[in-house]
Structures are given as C-alpha cells and as structure tokens.
Image (cartoon, rainbow, N blue to C red):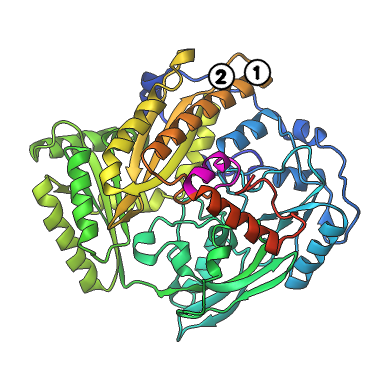
Amino acid sequence: MKRWNGWGDDSFNYPVGEGPRCFIEDLIGAGSPPIDATLSEVLTSIPQSRLPAHPLVSLEPLDRLKHARGHSLPDWIALRSGLVDAFPDGVAYPADLGHVRDLLRYASSAGACVIPYGGGTSVVGHINVQGGGPPCLSIDLGRLNHLKHFDMLSHLATFGAGVSGPDLEAQLRARGCTLGHFPQSFEYSTLGGWIVTRSSGQQSLGYGRIERLFAGGCLESPAGTLVLPPFPASAAGPDLREAVLGSEGRLGILTEATVRVAPLPQREEFHGFFFGSFEDGLQAVREIMQARLPLCLVRLSTAGETETNLALAGHERVIRVLKGMLSLRGLTGERCMLLVGCAGRRGMVSAAVSQVKAIAQPHGGVHLGQTFGKQWHKSRFRTPYLRNTLWEMGYAIDTLETAVSWTAIPGLVAELEHVLRIGLHDVGERVHVFTHLSHVYPYGSSIYTTYLYRCSSTKDRELDASETLRRWKVLKKAACRVILSHGGTISHQHGVGTDHLAYLAPEKGPLGVAALRSLCSCFDPQGIMNPGKLLA
C-alpha cells in the first residue's frame, strides 16, 4: 500500500547499515527520531467538507488527506507532524472526458477552485490547497490511464493523461517501443504531470525532455476544449503546445496526450568512469557533449557526492578494492564518478562508448566498466525511499536544481554548496551538501544539489516541526538567491508550484509575467484552476 506520509510502497524500506549511519553522524551529528503523528490523529483534524454532494466526488477524510500534499520537504514536515493546514473539500475520480467537463461545471457552480492531481509526486507544492480560500476540489486523473491509440508506422501513442510511468512503459514495451522518460519519481508520477511541469527524465539526453516527446493532446479548460493535433512540425503561428507545457494546471486539465515513442534499443549500456577532480570531469563532459555523441545519459558527481553514494551503498570491501584500483591508476586524492549511458543499435553503442573513452582518457578518466552503471540503473527508483529511512533517523533531506551555461557551472556549484554548508551555523548545526550534473547539453548543464541536516529534536512535535521547516526556509532562500545571482533558471525540471513563486518574476520579467497572466485568464476567466501555483 502507498504510504500516506512518505515515499512509495510501505512494504519496501531502504536499509541504512552501521557503516553508513556512522558516516552521516560523523558529518552532521547523531539524529534523534522525530515524534510522528498517527494516521488517526491526522484524520480527526480534517474539517467538514464545504462542497455539495456529487456522484463523482468523494468527501471521505482519507481521500482528502491523501490528496492534500505532495512530496516537498515542507509537505513531509506537515504530514509527519500532523500539522496540515488545509485539505481539499472533495476528491473526484473521472473516468472519461464527459466526467471532467461535468466536474469543471460543478466546481464553477459551487464557487470552488480545482486542483488537477496526477501522481501526487510534486516537490514544489503543485497540489497543495491554499488555506483560507474557497472550497477546493481535487480531480484525480488516475482512471484516465488507457492507451487510446497506437500508430506504429508514425511512432505515436495517445494515452489518458493519468497513466503512470510503469503502466505507460508496460503498454509500449508490449508493442516493442519505449517513451524513454524516466524521472526519479517514475513509479508514481504520470504523463500529464510530466507535461504540465516540463519534466526531464534521467535518460533525456537520448530520448529528449518531455517537450520533445509531447506531440499533442486535449486540454479541458473552463473556457472550453483545446485540441492539439500531433503534427510532426508546423509553421502555423506560435505552437500552443508550449502553452500547455509547464502550465501547472492553471489553464485547465490535460486529459489525454499523444507522445513520440521510439523502438526499444537493441542494446543499452551504462559505464562508469572516475576522475581525479571535478574540474577534470567537467572538461571531459563538456567535450563529450560538444562532440554530439549518441548517448542517453551523462551524469557527473562531485567528489562529495561520489564519496556519499559509495558510503551509503554500504559495500565496504568493494569500496576498499575500488580505492586501491584507482590509486594504482594515479587517482589518490579526490574521486569523481561519471556515469555514461548509451542505447541503440549494437554497433552504435560500442562506437559511442569507445569515443567517450578516447575523450575521457586525456583528462585522467579511468574507465571501470559497467559495474557502477548497472548498480545505478538497478537502484535508481529506490533512492527516494532513503528519505523515509533518514527521516526516521532524525534527518531531513532535500534537493535543489537549476541549469546554466558551461562558463557559470564551476562558480555556481562552489557558491551554492558553500551557502548551504554554512546556512545553519546560527543554530550550531552542520549541513552535508553534494552535487551532480545530470541533464547535460552542448551549451551547459543542469545542476542537482542534495543537502542533509538534522531535524529539530526538542520532543515537542509542533515546535520541532516549526524549527525543522524554518531551517529549510533559510537554506532554500539562500540557495535560490545564489542561483539567480549566477544567471541560473529557478527550475530545470520540477516546475514552479508554490516554492518558486517568488523567483519567477526575475526570470521572466514584468512583460513575461503579464503575458502568462493573460493566458491564464483566457482559458480560465473565473480563476478557479489551481490558484496560487506558477503565478501568485
């Protein structure tokens, strides 16, 4: 069963052994397990619904709780402490387009706002109810999950927008194809959610970000229906797909989407390289990208992330052997791991890997085969479960991501890690910080930074929740300021939601923000669609 206050299936846990536990304690101190609220406690705190009855709408407290929050750290703090401040007044589960239209009319007549709900995996507040506002209806698209049309000749597939990642891939693989879109939230996130937040999958280098994969679809808005034909290309004015991409539910509800799929690759390989410094790895990665090799993954970790990942893996003997091998090859100081993936025809994969080796070698890159790549690929969707374990040990963990040009990367990574590392000195707390580049382009890269700190531990649940959240706000604000000062985007792959609202205007400018407001008003004249997200 899916956890109501944490990540994933409650039958699966991510164990942390004694070695990894000592590693974390040495870095930031021993954690104290927080006092979590029980499900029954939270259910009794949910107020009566303000919505009138409707056959498609559930007013049950458990349904409303499960649709109240996503998976940002503030969401976790609220759920774990039992201090959720607002809940949807009802949850609807439409099974067809007629249901969606009926629910939009119902919400309008009831004076309610509408929050479209996909997999509930947002980490920036997309599905959160705004407290003190009108009644709220959460529309869960999970029943709109069928493959509606498959065109093998054109490599186009049309799905209901509520289809989850595993279900989508299973239906495509049965036909010899793949979408190739694998965000870390893949197990629970949905096609519609990927599109309206401009998602990027882990193998986007080869298959493309979601904007390249999204060919067309259907949007149901309060003002009417927008149909987007899946043209291969068009010069007939501005592309309205771009209005839907990244719209975060402000325009309406994406009910179906046509995507561009690819044949399953004959071969897929993930190789590991190690470099003596992040700078050496960075130069190699830039050259690899500008050589335009047919790769599906390039992921470079700093020395801090490499050490952390190896320590948390818990394979102490393997790590000792690895360090010995690298020392013999001249890497005795920092060690930065690069993962390179390639998928396609057998000959193409072999040729691409050979070219990567040739580029990496002059920069001191040591190739260690596929062992680390296979391990990463095997466990890539298990990593989010570590959040559950760390919380129960007394630690809060969160991530930040941005994208900048190559020239800005070294300075931004250094300053971003610095401000996070010293961010809680005012309360005598240490922060562990590590970074990787995971979505790389010929012109620059995304930067994905993870930070870990101790939860407050006074044993007063409300005070601890407040202080743990305050620490997050301090770190988030400092990091966002650094990102903007280096010319980075406020979000490379997670959207705006509520957490990035304050930073959108500096990126878009006054005229850009005004244009977005006008667009929202055109599709949603009454302003009932997901208020408070994307735009204040």
Q: Is residue 35 visible?
A: yes
Q: Quadrant of residue 302?
A: top left
Residue 424 in picture, x, y percent from top left: 46, 19
Side (left or right) of 185 relative to 57: left
| Residue positioned 87% across, 50% down in the render | 51
Q: Residues within 10 Å of mark 2 (few under 14, many from 20)?
A: many
Q: Quadrant of residue 456?
A: top right
Residue 436 in picture, x, y percent from top left: 33, 42
Q: Secondary structure at mark 2?
A: loop
| Residue positioned 45% across, 80% down in the render | 232
Highlighted range, magenta: 496-507
Extreme residue in the bottom direction: 153
Side (left or right) of 357 relative to 12: left
Name the residue type under label 1: Leu
The label number, if any, that marks residue 453 in the structure image: none
Residue receiving disc 1: 463
Judge by depth and name the residue closer to the eye, 517 or 293: 517
Badges 2 and 1: C-beta atoms under 8 Å apart?
Answer: yes
- N-terminal-most mark, 2 or 1: 2
The label number, if any, that marks residue 456 in the structure image: 2
Judge by depth and name the residue closer to the eye, 123 or 233: 233
Extreme residue in the front direction: 511
Name the residue type under label 2: Ser
Residue 488 to residue 518: above or below: above
Residue 244 in picture, x, y percent from top left: 58, 64
Q: Is residue 252 visible?
A: no
Judge by depth and name the residue closer to the eye, 228 or 374: 228
Q: Secondary structure at mark 1?
A: helix
502 part of magenta stretch: yes
Using the numbered discs, state the Cα–Cα distance from disc 2 to disc 1 in whole angstroms.
Answer: 8 Å
